[in-house]
Amino acid sequence: MESNNNTVSVWMTTYNHENFIAKAIDSVLKQKTKFNYEIIIGEDYSTDNTRNIVKAYKEKYQDKIRLFLPEKNLGMMAMTLATYSMCRGRYIAMLDGDDYWTDPLKLQKQVDFMENNPEYSFCFHNVSEYNELDDIILQTSHPSYNNADYSLIADSFIKADTPAYTLSVVFRNILDNPLPKWYHELPWGDVGLFCLLFKYGRAKYFTDNMGCYRVHNGGAYSGESDYANGVKAIKNFKILGQNLPYLNKKVINNTIAEYNFRLFKIDCQAININAAILHLFGMAYHDLTLVYKNLRCLTGSVLRMVLKTPGKYYQKLVVSSG
């Protein structure tokens, strides 16, 4: 890693964010800090005006912004890996191109904490969710804690609902560069990074609300269906469990079983019998106690699917014969 005089590298990736990227960059430029920071922006060959916007910001802030502009679309993980290697600061602050920060002291608060608490490898904070589809802003709930000082261990990050929003995270730039080969196979890189960081320390949560996460049709997570995200989550946690021996295997298995349960219920509603059976077995294989715990719900889902099945096939018969 090439050293420089920037304490923080603000790590941004963006794709088809022409309606959002300016606000994201402006929220970084409004930060009031006692230290220098740089902004790394990877623009993944958007089909809209995003690239022209980031190039205009680069022209205006030559010494502050560095761009990565591939000549073809790389995809989320390839872009993540390419831009991560450009971050030279002692700390890295994450921000996707469709989100933004709301507190001009965000970076200063988080860096001050990290400087004074070397036993923590990263920190994150509360955020709001702006649902572009319904035009409403929602306050997110605080994650559960193991103790009263708002510090979390890895177990909290390998559950079905990860407590940290990417836009809120500041972490020490201490991981291997390049990242491990298995990391490239992850559907979502942020959870993988958090789990890697737990090798070096705990995570600190700030109750201050200092950012906003956008929910919209083009989001990498919010733009996908619950089913697609469930399939990705199972793959994500299987890879993490296989490669990070210090993670709690019991918690990972419970999480994989929980996602299989969610997919099973969707399969039953859609009368996808084969997929439902596979996810039921996946649930039982990873955590049989979850099957017993939800036996009534499982039985009800199967019964409703069976009752719907004759009608479904009768409808197909009528259509084909007509």
Image: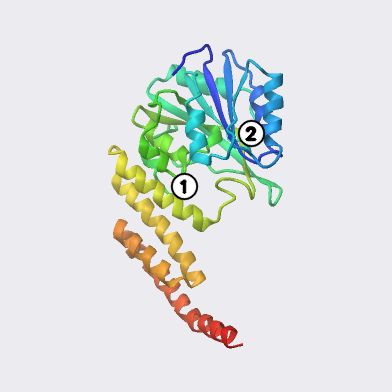
Which label number is shown at residue 81? none
Residue at x-position 41% and y-position 43%: 185
Quarter holding residue 148: top left
Front position among marks 2 and 1 = 2
Left or right of 54? Residue 140 is left
Give the answer, above or below, for where 2 lies relative to 269: above
Q: Which residue is mark 2?
A: 100
Q: Which residue is mark 1?
A: 161
Where residue 239 appears, as percent x and y from the top left, is 35, 45
Q: Is residue 32 above or below residue 282?
A: above
Coordinates of residue 219 in the picture (x, y in percent): 60, 46
Q: Amino acid at mark 2?
A: Tyr
Residue 195 visible? The answer is yes
Describe the element under mark 2 as helix, strand or loop: strand
Looking at the picture, how far across and down is residue 306, in whole percent? 45, 79
Q: Is 248 placed left or right of 57 in the picture?
A: left
> Residue 201 sits in which quadrant?
top left
Q: CA distance from mark 2 to mark 1?
A: 21 Å
Crowd tier of the residue under label 2, counting other residues whose Cα lies within 10 Å: few below 14, some 14–19, many 20 or above: many
The correct choice, above or below, for 53 with respect to 292 in the image is above
For residue 113, above or below residue 242: above
Going 31% across and 38% down the picture, which residue do you hit? 244
